């Protein structure tokens, strides 16, 4: 699977043949960073709305992380998947 983020304020999950599997909709500005959890069961997105969001693979928002005063340019999971890291 491939995860992409876009200026259209969505992230999308694709299969390797290019078929869209899921859209992640909820950011108020372009998405600048994406990451898969180590277990592959969730994704993390960061955007120009200064927010990071945690999603399940069905597109449901699980958690929102606010506090940055600038665009979230990088997101990552810890190796055990218990923590997220955001960079702005």
Image: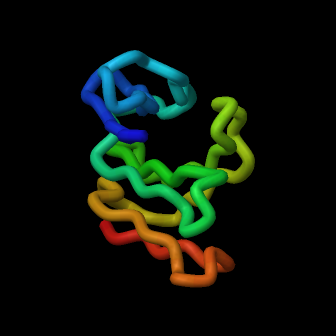
Identify whether 37 is placed above or below 80. above
Find residue 76 and report its image quarter: bottom left
Residue 6 point in image, percent of width and height: 28, 30
Identify whether 63 is placed above or below 22. below
Q: Residue lying at the far front in this picture: please name it.
A: 17
Q: Nearer the viewer, residue 1 or 44?
A: 1
* Residue depicted at 41% across the width and 28% down the height: 14
Residue 78 point in image, percent of width and height: 53, 81
74 with respect to 44 (left or right): left
Residue 58 point in image, percent of width and height: 69, 31
Q: Nearer the viewer, residue 2 or 32?
A: 2
* Residue depicted at 70% across the width and 52% down the height: 63
Identify whether 12 is placed above or below 48. above
Q: Quadrant of the C terminus?
A: bottom left
Residue 31 point in image, percent of width and height: 34, 39
42 with respect to 23 (left or right): right
* Residue depicted at 37% across the width and 45% down the height: 47
* Residue depicted at 33% across the width and 31% down the height: 16
């Amino acid at each position: 699977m491939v995860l992409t983020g876009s200026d259209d304020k969505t992230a999308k999950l694709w299969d390797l043949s290019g078929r869209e599997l899921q859209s992640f909709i909820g950011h108020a500005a372009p998405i600048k960073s994406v990451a898969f959890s180590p277990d592959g069961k969730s994704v993390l997105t960061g955007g120009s709305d200064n927010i990071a969001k945690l999603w399940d693979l069905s597109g449901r928002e699980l958690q929102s992380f606010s506090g940055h005063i600038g665009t979230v340019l990088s997101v990552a999971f810890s190796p055990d998947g218990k923590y997220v890291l955001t960079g702005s």
